[in-house]
Amino acid sequence: MIFLQLFLAHILTDFVFQTSKWVKQKQKKKSRSTFLYIHAFLAGLFSYLLLRDWDQILVPLFISITHFFIDLWKLNQKKDNLKYFLLDQFFHLLMIFLAWLYLSSNFDKIGTSFIYLLDSNSFLAILIAYLLIIFPVGFIIGKATEKWHDEILKNTKEPLSLKAAGRYIGIFERILVLTFILTDNFSAIGFLIAAKSILRFADKNEASARKQTEYVLIGTLMSFSITIIIGLLVRHIAF
């Protein structure tokens, strides 16, 4: 409950009550921006109001101060891109997590919980499975389909797709397939295949386009097959 209250305060602060006008002024003036200080104050205020522990002022103050310095760090970066947005949110959540540990007196349980996870066959099997499908499986598929990729590339002047788009599509589809298997939603895999077929295989009439379709289909089937096998092995080990 405490973590959810603090998390809600963060969402209200960063996304609900922060306008584009505030963001632009913060980016322009950085530490001289009035809205930066108001924004940090609201982070602490919402935390204080949602926690409803009127004698507890240290945690809202901690949230407010850390929110200010994390945002100031982000504002001083050369680029405002996805990388820094995710890092910004990660640091905010880390501060919320530390505040939750303090309020719930769970600091002494961190080590015990970590050791428990390392000794859990289920956790290790699931973790290894996701790491496998995200990293080495993509490399294996890339190497296995390399000759067809080179053949198509020789016959076309334009790039086959957006830069690294196929790689990321493959990663996300394998994550979804593995998740569906582990949550016993096998039927959802069929909908995923159908959706990808509609998006990737429509209007392919030319010979080069047909080769691209076959290339993508081979990669897709390899990706799904390997992920399904890994998922079934994990279910056998972990459940």
Image: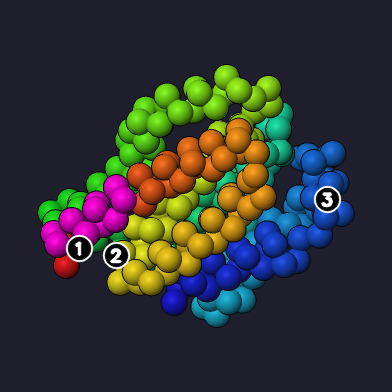
For the N terminus, the image quarter is bottom left
**Secondary structure mostly seen in the magenta stretch:** helix
Would you place residue 155 above or below residue 145 in this image? above
Under mark 3, the amino acid is Thr
Please give the name of the residue rendered at 25% of the width and 47% of the height, measured from the top-left corner.
Answer: 128
Residue 115 among those drawn in magenta: no
Left or right relative to 110: residue 221: right
- Point out residue 206 in the picture as x, y percentages from the top left corner: 65, 38
Q: Earlier in the sequence, mark 1 or mark 3?
A: 3
Q: Mark 1 and mark 3: span between their CA atoms?
A: 54 Å
Q: Secondary structure at mark 2?
A: helix
Q: Dot 1: within a 10 Å radius of its alpha carbon, few (fewer than 14), some, or many (20 or more) residues?
A: some
Can you identify the residue that label 3 sits on?
34
Report the mark closest to the observer, 1 or 3: 1
Q: Secondary structure at mark 1?
A: helix
**Image quadrant of residue 177?**
bottom left
Q: Mark 2 and mark 1: span between their CA atoms?
A: 6 Å
**Mark number, residue 235:** 1
Can you identify the residue that label 2 sits on?
182
> Relative to the observer, which residue lies in front, 147 or 34?
147
- Point out residue 176 in the picture as x, y percentages from the top left corner: 42, 58
| Contact, mark 2 vs mark 1 (Cβ under 8 Å) | yes
- Point out residue 93 in the picture as x, y percentages from the top left corner: 51, 55
Q: Mark 2 and mark 3: span between their CA atoms?
A: 49 Å
Range covered by the magenta-colored residues: 225-237
